Image: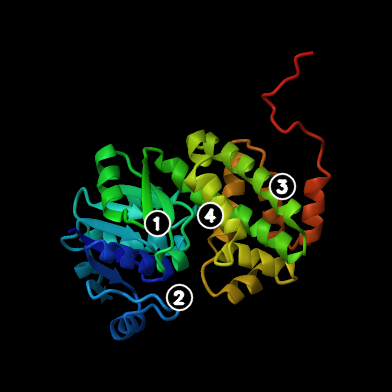
């Protein structure tokens, strides 16, 4: 049994709390909101964000950050990506040297272009920062629907420890040394999922979505490899796997926001309607900035930014993607003659 603290009591933090508690661990579930903590204590359920999933008795809700971080074997960062830096700063005075911290959020900071593990390392000096990602909607993990993810760590020993911690009969965990690739795959696929939602909102069909997802993984891989990720990672769970689930699932907030925009809402209106953080909106600007910095061609990301921030009509964006200059599918393949 390990002592684990989960920072962030939203849908994903609560689902992982249930998983880790069911695995026999002593789990603290922290929220900045005393109202949220009181709800968890009274009902043993995240009624607002994960209704129907009951929290076991070995989960302790808390709004005391210092107590939640003291004498823990593992800390899981499950706050939305836009507030990771703010929360990490608050955590820093209470985190011991060498503390294992697992980031489970997905995003890129839109000002600095830092990944979330970069941010945590900057704000909490000396921490052993890892990442867990993959096609894993909280609504399904909380209901014990079979799920597979990958954990990335700088050392194999830490990766295997986390594999043992999280793995169960319904939650399979692979390991990888490619922390940056896992982070980028999880963040960049949200941008493509916004575009997939737009095509649904416009009433387009399976052909359109298949094309978007296939060319989306090509963009995601080009940019991810340019930033130091490994190509194999983007062909795996946190690349194509996460892309598939986020572009097609009813649970995907990024797809839903895109769908609402395709139906005529502005980006702000769509985010308000979704009522949770739509991380792809924040990652879109960072992805485009990184693509320009590293001279990587990302036409889908370009058009998503135009729709999000410049008011471009989504239907026009799709048309512009289709009528671009003619290209080969794979530039490294040549004819013999």
Relative to residue 242, is residue 141 depicted above or below?
Answer: below
Mark 3 sits on what residue?
Answer: 211
Tag of residue 225: none
Numbered disc 3: secondary structure: helix
Extreme residue toward the bottom, this view:
42
- Disc 2 and disc 4 in contact, CB within 8 angstroms: no
Residue 321 x %, y %: 77, 48
Relative to residue 139, is residue 236 depicted above or below?
Answer: above
User: Label 4 to label 1, Cα distance in Å?
Assistant: 18 Å
Labels 2 and 4: the sequence-earlier one = 2
- Disc 2 and disc 1 in contact, CB within 8 angstroms: no
Labels 2 and 3: the sequence-earlier one = 2
Tag of residue 110: 4
Residue at 40 percent across and 68 percent down: it is 142
Tell us which disc is closer to us: 4 or 3. Answer: 3
- Disc 4 and disc 1 in contact, CB within 8 angstroms: no
User: Label 2 to label 4, Cα distance in Å?
Assistant: 26 Å
Numbered disc 2: secondary structure: loop
Q: Is residue 47 or residue 108 the one in the foreground?
A: 47
User: Label 2 to label 1, Cα distance in Å?
Assistant: 17 Å
Q: Is residue 319 or residue 82 the one in the foreground?
A: 319
Mark 2 sits on what residue?
Answer: 49
Residue at 35 percent across and 53 percent down: it is 120
Mark 1 sits on what residue?
Answer: 104
Extreme residue toward the front, this view:
169
Residue at 39 percent across and 75 percent down: it is 53
């Amino acid at each position: 049994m390990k002592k684990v603290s989960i920072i962030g009591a939203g849908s994903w933090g609560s689902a992982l709390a249930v998983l880790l508690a069911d695995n026999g661990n002593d789990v603290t579930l922290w929220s900045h909101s005393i109202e949220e903590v009181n709800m968890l204590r009274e009902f043993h359920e995240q009624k607002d964000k994960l209704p129907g999933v009951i929290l076991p008795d070995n989960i302790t809700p808390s709004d005391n950050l210092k107590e939640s971080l003291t004498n823990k074997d593992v800390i899981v960062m499950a706050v939305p990506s836009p507030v990771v830096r703010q929360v990490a700063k608050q955590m820093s005075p209470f985190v011991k040297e060498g503390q294992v911290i697992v980031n489970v959020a997905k995003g890129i900071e839109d000002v600095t272009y830092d990944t979330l593990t970069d941010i945590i390392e900057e704000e909490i000096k000396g921490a052993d920062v890892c990442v867990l990602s993959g096609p894993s909607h909280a609504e399904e993990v909380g209901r014990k629907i079979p799920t597979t993810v990958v954990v990335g760590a700088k050392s194999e020993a830490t990766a295997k420890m986390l594999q043992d911690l999280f793995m169960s009969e319904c939650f399979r965990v692979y390991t990888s040394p490619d922390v940056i690739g896992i982070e980028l795959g999880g963040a960049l696929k949200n941008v493509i999922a916004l575009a997939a939602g737009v095509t649904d909102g416009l009433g387009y069909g399976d052909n359109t979505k298949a094309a978007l997802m296939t060319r989306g993984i090509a963009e995601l891989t080009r940019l991810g490899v340019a930033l130091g990720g490994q190509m194999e990672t983007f062909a795996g769970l946190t690349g194509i796997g996460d892309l598939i689930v986020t572009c097609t699932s009813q649970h995907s907030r990024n797809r839903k926001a895109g769908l609402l925009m395709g139906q005529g809402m502005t980006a702000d209106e769509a985010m308000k309607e979704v009522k949770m953080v739509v991380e792809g909106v924040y990652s879109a600007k960072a992805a485009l900035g990184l693509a320009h910095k590293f001279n990587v061609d990302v036409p889908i990301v370009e058009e998503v930014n135009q729709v999000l921030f410049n008011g471009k009509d989504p239907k026009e964006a799709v048309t512009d993607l289709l009528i671009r200059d003619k290209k080969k599918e794979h530039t490294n393949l040549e004819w013999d003659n």
